Image (tube, helix red, strand yellow):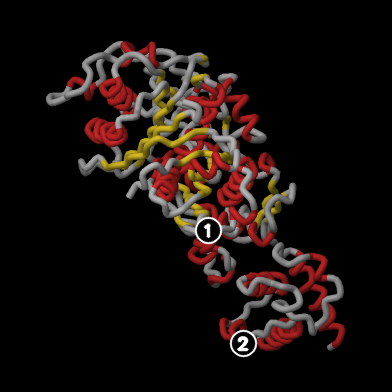
């Protein structure tokens, strides 16, 4: 249970972001209103087998990595070489691409936090990181060698398990930084990124740990992309930079993206005592389930209960609501209305950063949490690019019998959703993420000086 | 015989150079008496990868029992390669 008076500060952040050289580049591009979405040559190579051709992908060279392929050569990344020497080869041997990004993000977060070696390696330091998908790139080749080529299991190599297991990112980061506290993963589809930070927050808030390296990851994988492409839920028919269009009337799906968002959390008084630069203070975290038996369809009731749970402590009055906003036809407006019906029609802005960098699946919640920390730092609301026209008509779900939410169309809330960067005083941001299975998560983060 | 062992050793070194978890500097001066675990600090999980790479390099296939019995010295691997080559003739 919560220990009275114990608060949780964010003291470091890092990760991997499409088209960006580092966190500063990510910061700069986001607030310049740029899109990080590109045509994906790897998808285009499969021509008509694939429906959507745009993504927020990150290549190995863009992260100063080199994939080592077997001889005779196949696509299989046998291991990675870190061209900048940041990660030891022994750690790279047990890592898939997402794990390498997680380790780099952990290093950056720890450096920014300014933790000593003793603090990092303490029993009071935990690691809570996960991705949404399995190690699909690694598994694919192991299975192909066995089932299709009829090879012995050892031809897959002895690292299939550690490079593909569900909690590989946490395991790899823990082996790299040698913490002696908790090492776990929380996996909840597209709520994974925020869910891990939420769990790590509770570990500290409940007095079980003093520090945590936490976040979500989704390594570039066409193997992951094709599952969503098959569901026909990916954006199609727009120029890359216009493909991710939350709230826009012409939206027709999300843009599949990849990345990593890692943050360092620390018990607030400890962070203050050592003079840490506090990027934000987490006010509350709450998560729940829709409970309606529907794997995919968002729930107004579930989201309203999510808000109720988040606001139970009485300290939630956000200046910005960072929504999940994937740009799927139903989800955006249902979410918009659950926000409006909770907070009213004035006094805050809505930010949907997927408009700029797409949907990073298991990394979405944590990278968007970092985007929110940048909004706190810059005192600017990110622009909801491509939200060109909001529907002036009611959505179909608003016309159904028994609908209890707002009876205004999306266009009535244009003033909450800006296509331009908005400079204003931002003291508190609420972050929302949801996942398949009807899982919902919400976190509130505030400026330290407010 | 000696030439064959030397050729296999050289081929094995080519394989070991592709194993990223082995420090390349430790490969200088490798002999048949070199021990993968104690001298090269090879992670034990890596031995199976080395065996699989050796199969590809020398176009041979070990039985599972061959690998189970394989020692951790370079000469053990060379003995095994020669034995499997003979067996397949």
Q: Is residue A434 above or below residue A99?
A: above
Give residue A194's quadrant in the image. Answer: top left
Element carrying mark 2: helix
Element carrying mark 1: helix
Q: Callout 2 environment at 10 Å: few (<14), some (14 to 19), or many (20+)?
A: few
Determine whether, in the image, residue A439 is placed left or right of residue A26: left
> In this orientation, does residue A227 appear?
no
Query: Which residue is rendered at x = 59% and y = 67% of the image?
Result: A157
Say if mark 1 contacts mark 2, CB within 8 Å.
no
Q: Which mark is residue B69?
A: 2
Chain letter for the residue marked with disc 1 in the picture: A
Query: Which residue is rendered at x = 45% and y = 24% of the image?
Result: A427
Determine whether, in the image, residue A1 is placed left or right of residue A177: left
Position of residue A8 measured from the top left corner of the image (x, y, whole percent):
46, 41
Position of residue A396 measured from the top left corner of the image (x, y, whole percent):
23, 22
- The quadrant of the picture occupied by the N terminus of chain B is bottom right
Position of residue A163 measured from the top left corner of the image (x, y, whole percent):
55, 59
Q: Which mark is residue A62?
A: none
> In this orientation, does residue A387 appear?
yes
**Residue, disc 1:** A171
Give residue A330's quadrant in the image. Answer: top left
Q: Which of the two marks, 1 or 2, is nearer to us in this view?
A: 1
């Amino acid at each position: 249970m919560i220990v009275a008076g114990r608060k949780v500060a964010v003291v470091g952040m890092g990760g991997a972001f499409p088209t960006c050289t580092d966190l500063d580049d990510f910061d700069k591009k986001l607030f310049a209103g740029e899109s990080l979405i590109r045509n994906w040559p790897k998808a285009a190579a499969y021509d008509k087998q694939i429906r959507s051709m745009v993504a927020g992908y990150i290549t190995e060279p863009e992260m100063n990595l080199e994939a080592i392929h077997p001889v005779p050569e196949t696509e299989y990344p046998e291991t990675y070489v870190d061209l900048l020497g940041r990660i030891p080869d022994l750690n790279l041997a047990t890592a898939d691409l997402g794990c390498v990004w997680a380790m780099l993000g952990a290093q950056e977060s720890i450096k920014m936090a300014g933790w000593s070696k003793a603090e990092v390696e303490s029993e009071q330091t935990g690691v809570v990181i996960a991705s949404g998908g399995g190690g699909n790139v690694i598994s694919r080749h192991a299975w192909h060698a066995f089932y299709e080529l009829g090879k012995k299991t050892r031809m897959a190599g002895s690292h299939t398990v550690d490079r593909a297991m569900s909690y590989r990112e946490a395991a790899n980061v823990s082996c790299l930084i040698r913490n002696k506290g908790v090492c776990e993963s929380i996996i909840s589809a597209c709520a994974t990124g925020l869910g891990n930070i939420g769990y790590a927050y509770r570990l500290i808030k409940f007095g079980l740990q003093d520090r945590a390296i936490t976040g979500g990851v989704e390594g570039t994988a066409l193997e992951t992309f094709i599952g969503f492409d098959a569901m026909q839920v990916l954006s199609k028919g727009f120029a890359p930079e216009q493909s991710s269009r939350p709230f826009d009337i012409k939206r027709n799906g999300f843009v599949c993206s990849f990345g990593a968002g890692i943050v360092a959390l620390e018990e607030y008084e400890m962070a203050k005592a050592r003079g840490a630069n506090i990027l934000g203070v987490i006010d509350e975290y709450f998560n729940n389930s829709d409970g309606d038996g529907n794997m995919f369809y968002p729930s107004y009731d579930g989201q309203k209960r999510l808000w109720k749970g988040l606001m139970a402590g009485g300290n939630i009055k956000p200046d910005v609501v960072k929504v999940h906003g994937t740009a799927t036809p139903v989800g955006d407006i249902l979410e918009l209305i659950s926000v409006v019906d909770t907070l009213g029609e004035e006094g805050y802005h809505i930010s949907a950063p997927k408009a700029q960098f797409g949907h990073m699946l298991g990394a979405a919640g944590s990278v968007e949490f970092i985007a929110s920390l940048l909004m706190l730092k810059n005192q600017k609301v990110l622009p909801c690019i491509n939200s060109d026209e909001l529907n002036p008509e009611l959505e179909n779900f608003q016309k159904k019998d028994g609908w209890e939410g707002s009876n205004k169309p999306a266009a009535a809330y244009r003033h909450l959703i800006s296509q331009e960067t908005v400079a204003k005083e931002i003291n508190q941001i609420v972050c929302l993420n949801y996942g398949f299975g009807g899982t919902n998560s919400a976190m509130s983060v505030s400026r330290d000086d407010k | 015989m000696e030439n064959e062992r030397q050729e296999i050793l050289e081929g094995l070194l080519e394989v070991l150079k592709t194993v990223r978890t082995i420090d390349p500097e430790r490969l200088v001066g490798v002999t048949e008496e070199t021990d993968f675990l104690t001298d090269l600090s090879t992670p034990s999980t890596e031995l199976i990868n080395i065996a699989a790479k050796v199969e590809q390099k020398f176009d041979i296939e070990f039985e599972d029992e061959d690998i189970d019995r394989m020692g951790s010295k370079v000469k053990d691997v060379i003995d095994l390669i020669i034995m499997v080559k003979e067996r397949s003739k």
